[in-house]
Image (spheres, rainbow, N blue to C red):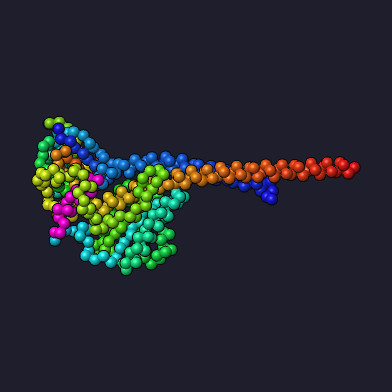
């Protein structure tokens, strides 16, 4: 049986761990609120842009002059998986889930005989190196910025576009965790290059002028506008993924730390009982010794 | 009144009713009043002038990289940066 002193040390150690997890939980809760607000603030822009790009590209579909960002390179061989993860760990299964989604996609693509490359945005995606040591195209650290700016998404997007222009890949998918609620984060994969245009009319709200039936003037022209908007759209998709990720990360961490705090509490209870029993046993033994000593006299 | 919205990826900067907005389009500046014909235009880096009322001194907002859309609901400017 563990000695009294060892138990005491153990209890104290668990107590200080509990203090840390409790503090982390509260910090995550505070950050979650901010991240959630940021994600919401970014929504109008993304929705607007998406609606415009969708309506324009449907009009121009099949045209010869459309940008390769819309029509693709004509090949479907090299797939780039952009894996957006967090910069820090201790967030439960948050990063693991994103990475797992990306790996599942990679296996699926490889089974079809495609070449898969990875683009890591965020430090915690590096575990992929272990599984695909030769397929990492780039490792982009997001840095320890306090708040995510559009600038960071821009950097990633510009890099992606340059690689696309250089013919390094044919299709790009983006993996991140969608923020559903503080308790639920859903890892999702989404094709960003070439733009996946949904054919259904239902998901395009009638915000865009084209649906009003009115004749819309274009300056310079449809192709020109689309050529300008498509690269921007990539940046926005990346930015949106980052914002969703930031909110999901904090939500996930809050949960993980809440569980950790509770577990530490249970452990302290268990250890205290054990400590008290051991102490009682020691006292009983001492008493028995004294009594039997007295009787012997 | 013209409903005017200025949106950046980070937030909705403006959403208000104004008299007129002059937008620096790629092919030249254009002013948007209420009832403007539907229009889509790319925007060059420059300054938006917002006239709250007729004849008022315009308020200028510098914008970078963007796109403007006029429809029945009003004018929406999507800019990458606005200050």
Magenta stretch: helix, strand or loop mostly: helix
Question: Could you say which is closer to the camera, residue A247 or residue A288?
Answer: A288
Residue A58 magenta-drawn? yes
Q: Give the range drawn in magenta.
A: A47-63
Q: Which residue is drawn at 21% across and 65% down?
A: A74
x then y, percent, for residue A256: 47, 47
Question: Could you say which is closer to the camera, residue A2 or residue A141?
Answer: A2
The answer to whether one can see residue A182 in this image is yes
x then y, percent, for residue A70: 21, 57
Residue A291 magenta-drawn? no
Screen quadrant of the C terminus of chain A: top right
Q: Which residue is drawn at 21% across and 47% down?
A: A202
Q: Which residue is drawn at 41% across and 59% down?
A: A126
x then y, percent, for residue A217: 10, 47
Question: Could you say which is closer to the camera, residue A182 or residue A30?
Answer: A182
Q: Which residue is drawn at 37% across and 58% down?
A: A102
x then y, percent, for residue A263: 54, 45
The answer to whether one can see residue A159 in this image is no
The image quarter in which residue A147 lies: top left
Q: Residue furthest bottom?
A: A113
């Amino acid at each position: 049986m563990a000695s009294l002193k060892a138990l005491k040390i153990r209890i104290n150690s668990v107590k200080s761990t509990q203090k840390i997890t409790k503090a982390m939980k509260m910090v995550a809760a505070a950050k979650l609120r901010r991240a959630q607000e940021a994600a919401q603030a970014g929504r109008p822009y993304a929705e607007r842009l998406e609606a415009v790009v969708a309506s324009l590209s449907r009009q121009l579909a099949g045209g010869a002059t459309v940008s390769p960002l819309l029509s693709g390179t004509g090949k479907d061989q090299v797939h780039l998986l952009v894996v957006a993860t967090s910069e820090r760990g201790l967030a439960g299964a948050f990063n693991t889930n994103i990475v797992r989604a990306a790996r599942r996609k990679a296996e699926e693509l490889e089974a079809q005989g495609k070449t898969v490359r990875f683009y890591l945005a965020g430090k915690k995606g590096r575990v992929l190196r272990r599984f695909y040591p030769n397929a990492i195209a780039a490792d982009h650290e997001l840095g320890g910025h306090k708040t995510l700016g559009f600038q960071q998404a821009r950097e990633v997007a510009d890099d992606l576009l340059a690689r696309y222009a250089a013919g390094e890949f044919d299709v790009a998918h983006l993996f991140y965790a969608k923020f559903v609620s503080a308790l639920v984060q859903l890892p999702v994969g989404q094709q960003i290059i070439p733009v996946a245009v949904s054919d259904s009319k239902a998901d395009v709200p009638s915000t865009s002028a084209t649906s009003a039936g009115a004749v819309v003037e274009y300056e310079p022209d449809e192709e020109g506008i689309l050529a300008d908007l498509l690269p921007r759209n990539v940046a926005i998709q990346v930015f949106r993924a980052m914002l969703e990720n930031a909110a999901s990360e904090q939500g996930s961490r809050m949960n993980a730390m809440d569980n950790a705090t509770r577990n530490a509490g249970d452990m302290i209870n268990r250890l205290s009982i054990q400590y008290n029993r051991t102490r009682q046993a020691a006292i009983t033994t001492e008493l028995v010794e004294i009594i039997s000593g007295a009787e012997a006299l | 009144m013209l409903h005017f919205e200025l949106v950046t990826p980070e937030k909705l900067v403006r959403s208000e009713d104004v008299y007129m907005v002059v937008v620096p389009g790629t092919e030249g500046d254009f002013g948007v009043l209420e009832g403007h014909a539907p229009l889509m235009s790319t925007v060059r880096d420059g300054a938006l002038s917002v006239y709250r009322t007729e004849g008022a001194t315009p308020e200028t907002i510098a914008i970078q990289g963007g796109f403007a859309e006029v429809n029945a609901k009003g004018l929406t400017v999507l800019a990458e940066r606005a200050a």
